């Protein structure tokens, strides 16, 4: 086409297109009959050739897919157009293509009957002479308005008119509540429906979750103060004695009202520690002698996950090779059953469906979400290596040699956090070491094990992703915090809340850490909690009890029960009418505090001894956990949850306020009997 005639050609093409639009066009009409303009004919011919090549895949799979999709959409549009325009020939032409579409989308009944329907249309002039002419005039659709392009199928017209008028239109919840007869029918059948549902649930042995049962129990105890008020009318209640009982099935200082444990933002501790470095930052080396990587963190960093696991393993290897180090250690978690982390995994909804993968197996569509499945997380690791053991890979004579490194195998370590520290502590030569991870726990455990290295190591922790990725010098942090605080950090982290232990409600880690920094007594107690000396352990527990009281604002108190009573007195003392009374006591009782410290001791001993192949000999069931349905659950307290007798919570010297005319024995028997029965049968609530 020459440059001198573009405007003329453009006008000519527009005129031809307008002429083409005004014609009565059928699908059988050829393009050549309608297009006198050779340029437009050539353009459309070229476009048709382009479409054919695209459908054949000459322009790539993506273009082929979308061209096929456009073609299928065009089939539906053509069907709708044939009905709306009353074009019988176009209707017959498109039915077989729609039949193929039904078959593709797994609608066999539609596909089967469309074939029969198409056969009937082809032979309609033989079976019903004269009917084909009626169809060609548009009688296979109904036009209810004067507007063009408004015909609709006969069956749809029936549904919108006759069938709709015959049906009852008063449906839905609004019409149900406005209908007296409907409400009466619902009432009469309610008991029958309830009986059927209860029968089905009983046969299925369907029960509510334990977590929900705790909610119900908490709700049933909401009138504790009402009962105590009733008892106080005839007896003087010892509130201090009442508050020595837990009162709730779970401590409100560490649990929410639904029974779930309180969590805290662990990263706040990391940010606080980073701030202490300030501008006093060492320059990292250009390359590291050793890189230790958290394997699952690296899997999460994969932006474009390949379709098959074989390709995924190759991509994963290419990610590892980007670290220019003489040696790279890839460390994965392993999963024990039961585990002290069962509660946390239940909270995260980490499912346990069995999974097996192979090289050519297609990965799950949402690979990152599937990593919540414990067994699926293990499957890629089993695909790459054997969990619990450590293998080294090196190249010799263009061959990859795989060797079992027994010295680095640590089967008793469950989390990658402690396994990484174990690998570091086995290094026997001076080296620059980089740890790529995302977890605060690793830095805390690392600082607690700085005295167990076998060589002079310079340690860098590579945290964050994207614009937030940074290198932190663990040696500089240890120097700034000091050896005493660093050794106390594992216990402190477990005490104030981690993946294994609950946090104190709304206490966080920032203020408790400042208290720890200022007290050598608390630092020493955090270090001594792993001792096996019973006398020293008792003294350590007493000091940590004082630390907990200090966290709750009672600097000089050594008893959590006294702090609980004092907080109760401060909260519910006489107030002005406008003061808010909607508060709750969130301190520990002595039994709950004791079990919490046992759990802290177990976790701290594991972390502090992360440099050992066998870090602890303690048993979880002797350290604040109990076995429940083959899972470890928390033991919150020993003994009674509530006072069992009224006599347990009254001051006996002032237990009578009744008429002195009655005998003392009669009064004691009557009051004890009635109040005790009422008290035991009534629910009690936690403040």
Image: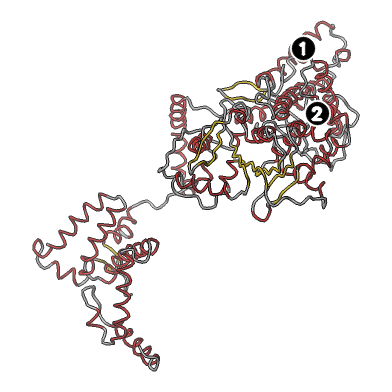
Q: Kindly state the secondary structure of the residue where label 2 is placed.
A: helix
Could you say where residue 84 lies in the image, as x and y percent from the top left?
29, 69
Q: Kindly state the secondary structure of the residue where label 1 is placed.
A: helix
> Which residue is at the far right?
556
Of labels 2 and 1, the one closer to you = 2
**Which mark is drawn over residue 127?**
none
> Which residue is at the far bottom?
4
The residue tagged 1 is 672
For the residue pair 620 and 2, the one nearer the viewer reads as 2
Task: State how far apart marks 2 and 1 are (Cα).
Answer: 47 Å
Tell whether 449 sits left or right of 334: right
Q: In which quarter of the image is the C terminus?
A: top right
> Which residue is at the far front?
397
Q: In which quarter of the image is the N terminus?
A: bottom left
Q: How crowded is mark 1: few (under 14 residues within 10 Å), some or many (20 or more)?
A: some
For the residue pair 544 and 141, the one nearer the viewer reads as 544
For the residue pair 389 and 187, the one nearer the viewer reads as 389
Residue in the image at 73% along x and 42% along y: 459
Could you say where residue 214 lies in the image, as x and y percent from the top left?
63, 28
Residue in the image at 43% along x and 29% along y: 196
The residue tagged 2 is 526
Could you say where residue 572 lies in the image, as x and y percent from the top left?
84, 33
Residue in the image at 80% along x and 32% along y: 488
Could you say where residue 64 lies in the image, as x and y percent from the top left?
35, 63
Tell whether 369 sits left or right of 536: left
Residue 65: quadrant of the picture: bottom left
Badge 2 or badge 1: first in the primary sequence = 2
Tell whether 490 sits left or right of 306: right
Tell whether 629 sits left or right of 662: left
Q: In this view, does 514 lie above or below 175?
A: above
Q: Residues within 10 Å of mark 2 (few under 14, many from 20)?
A: many
Residue 181: quadrant of the picture: top left
């Amino acid at each position: 086409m020459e440059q001198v005639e573009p405007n003329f050609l453009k006008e000519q093409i527009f005129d031809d297109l307008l002429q083409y639009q005004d014609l009565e066009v059928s699908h059988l009409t050829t393009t050549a009959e309608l297009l006198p303009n050779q340029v437009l004919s050539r353009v459309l011919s070229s476009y048709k050739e382009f479409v054919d090549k695209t459908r054949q895949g000459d322009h790539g799979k993506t273009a082929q897919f979308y061209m096929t999709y456009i073609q299928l959409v065009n089939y539906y549009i053509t069907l709708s157009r044939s009905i709306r325009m009353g074009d019988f020939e176009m209707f017959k032409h498109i039915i077989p293509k729609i039949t193929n579409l039904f078959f593709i989308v797994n609608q066999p009944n539609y596909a089967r009957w469309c074939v029969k329907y198409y056969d009937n249309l082809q032979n309609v002039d033989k079976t019903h002479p004269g009917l084909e002419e009626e169809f060609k005039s548009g009688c296979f659709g109904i036009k209810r308005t004067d507007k063009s392009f408004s015909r609709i199928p006969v069956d749809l017209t029936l549904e919108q008119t006759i069938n709709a008028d015959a049906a009852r239109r008063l449906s839905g919840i609004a019409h149900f509540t406005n209908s007296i007869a409907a409400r009466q029918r619902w009432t009469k059948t309610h008991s029958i429906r309830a009986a059927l549902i209860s029968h089905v649930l009983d046969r299925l042995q369907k029960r509510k979750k334990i977590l929900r049962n705790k909610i119900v129990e908490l709700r049933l105890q909401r009138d504790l103060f009402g009962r105590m008020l009733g008892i106080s009318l005839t007896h003087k209640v010892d509130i201090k004695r009442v508050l020595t009982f837990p009162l709730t099935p779970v401590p409100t200082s560490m649990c929410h009202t639904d029974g779930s444990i309180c969590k805290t933002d662990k990263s706040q501790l990391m940010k606080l520690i980073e701030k202490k470095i300030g501008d006093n930052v060492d320059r990292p080396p250009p390359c590291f002698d050793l890189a230790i990587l958290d394997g699952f963190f690296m899997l999460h960093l994969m932006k474009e996950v390949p379709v098959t696991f074989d390709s995924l393993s190759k991509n994963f290897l290419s990610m590892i090779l980007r670290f220019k180090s003489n040696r790279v250690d890839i460390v994965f978690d392993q999963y024990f059953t039961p585990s002290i982390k069962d509660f946390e995994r239940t909270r995260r909804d980490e499912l346990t469906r069995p999974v097996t993968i192979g090289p050519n197996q297609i990965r799950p569509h949402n690979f990152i979400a599937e990593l919540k499945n414990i067994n699926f997380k293990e499957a890629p690791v089993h695909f790459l290596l054997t969990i619990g053991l450590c293998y080294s890979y090196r190249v010799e004579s263009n061959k990859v040699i795989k060797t079992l490194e027994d010295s680095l195998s640590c089967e008793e370590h469950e989390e990658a956090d402690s396994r990484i520290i174990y690998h570091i502590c086995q290094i026997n030569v001076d080296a620059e070491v980089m740890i790529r991870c995302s977890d605060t726990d690793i830095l805390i455990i690392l600082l607690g094990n700085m005295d167990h290295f076998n060589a002079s190591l310079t340690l860098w922790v590579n945290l964050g992703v994207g614009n937030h990725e940074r290198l932190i010098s663990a040696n500089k942090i240890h120097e700034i915090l000091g050896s005493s605080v660093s050794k106390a950090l594992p216990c402190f982290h477990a005490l104030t809340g981690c993946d294994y232990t609950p946090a104190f409600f709304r206490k966080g880690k920032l203020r408790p850490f400042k208290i720890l920094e200022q007290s050598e007594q608390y630092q020493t107690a955090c270090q001594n909690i792993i001792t096996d000396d019973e006398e020293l352990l008792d003294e350590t527990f007493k000091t940590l009890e004082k630390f907990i009281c200090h966290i709750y604002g009672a600097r000089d108190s050594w008893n959590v029960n006294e702090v609980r009573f004092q907080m109760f007195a401060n909260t519910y003392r006489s107030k002005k009418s406008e003061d808010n009374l909607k508060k709750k006591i969130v301190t520990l009782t002595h039994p709950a505090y004791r079990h919490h410290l046992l759990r802290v001791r177990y976790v701290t001993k594991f972390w502090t001894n992360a440099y050992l192949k066998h870090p602890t000999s303690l048993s979880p069931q002797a350290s604040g956990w109990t076995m429940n349905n083959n899972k470890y659950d928390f033991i919150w307290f020993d003994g009674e949850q509530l006072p069992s007798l009224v006599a347990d919570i009254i001051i006996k010297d002032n237990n009578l306020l009744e008429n002195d005319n009655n005998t003392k024995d009669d009064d004691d028997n009557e009051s004890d009997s009635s109040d005790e029965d009422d008290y035991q049968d009534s629910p009690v609530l936690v403040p």
